[in-house]
Image (spheres, rainbow, N blue to C red):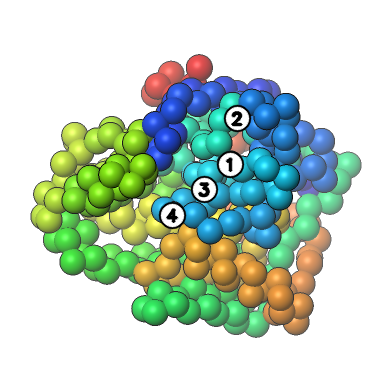
Amino acid sequence: MQTTIAHKIQFRGVGLHSGAAVRLAILPAPADHGIVFVRTDLNGARIPARWDLVTPSQLCTLLDNGAGATVSTVEHVMAALAGTGITNAVIEVNGPEIPILDGSSEPFVRGIVTAGLREQPEAALRAIRILRPVEVQHGQALARLSPADHLEIHFDIDFTDAAIGHQEKRLDMANGSFVLELMDSRTFCRQADVVQMQQNGLALGGTYLNAVVIDGDKVLSPGGLRHSDEAVRHKMLDAMGDLALAGAPILGRYTGHRAGHAMTNKLLRALFAAPDAWEWVEVGDDLYGRLPGAGVVAGARHLAASGIERAVA
């Protein structure tokens, strides 16, 4: 069945690239609504969270409704919704960028768990089953979807910086793996890149507290890494959020090699351009247990017991 958030939850923060103060709220939505962003500063302009509304942007995922309204850096909140099994929601935001909070999806997940989940048994949930491999490449980067009976993410990255180096991880995303393994992994960047980005009007809201900043073999952010392989975990988190723009859970294996937001969106475009590569399936009890968010909210109330006040207004 489909699901929505049980109660409104609110967040305050700054945009990573704009540096502007942002207020965001996640609200319940009816069945068959999907995830829709609403720009409260633009007379309620609506921007559906869809792969075909993604427009080229540096370093984040940006949605454009084609009528003058955009919203950027949507990947972390989209990953949180997918990872907790929310299929219908309104996301109100009073500016063009989602707040970065701590650079991960954890604050959003904690907020969702606090609000709870409401089942919508009046509407069937459909998933996208991958029938044959679909792959896109650009230079050394590759992204692929191939058949599997649940969502699996396999990612590897390779950086010259000793603090990151080569990292590879594979996860079955069923059974709450997103919450257990990925949600707290933060965005990362090089110290030298921060200066260059800020000179180009980007990362104006970036700090050592909302990103992992590295310099060669050093991690400059206070407290160091949350995981020794936090960088690849965050890339998997981003992929989870970008794949959620498919509009339904995916039953398939995602492989990313040096991939990023643009490659994942290019992969979704290739998938939906190949009708023989996928099919709709109705999610019954047997399939529901294989989805990333199955049972997460009901079984993870302890997540809200500490630290929620740092992000929730």
Residue topped by disc 2: 93
Q: Are marks 1 and 2 in contact (CB under 8 Å)?
A: yes
Question: Residue 91 sits in which quadrant?
Answer: top right
Residue topped by disc 1: 71
Q: Is residue 185 left or right of residue 131?
A: left
Q: Residue at x 36, y 42 (%)?
A: 201
Q: Residue at x 28, y 34 (%)?
A: 207
Image location of residue 177, percent across then percent down: 48, 52
Q: Is residue 57 left or right of residue 54?
A: left
Q: Residue at x 40, y 74 (%)?
A: 141
**Can see residue 284?**
yes
Image location of residue 99, percent across then percent down: 47, 33
Image location of residue 213, percent across then percent down: 23, 45
Label 2 vs label 3, nearer the camera: 2
Count neighbours of disc 3 (C-alpha within 10 A) and say few if under 14, some if 14 to 19, many if 20 or more.
many
Sequence-earlier tag: 4 or 2: 4
Q: Is residue 221 left or right of residue 41?
A: left
Sequence-earlier tag: 1 or 4: 4
User: Mark 4 to mark 2: distance in Å?
Assistant: 21 Å
Sequence-earlier tag: 2 or 3: 3
Task: Identify the element where label 1 is drawn.
Answer: strand
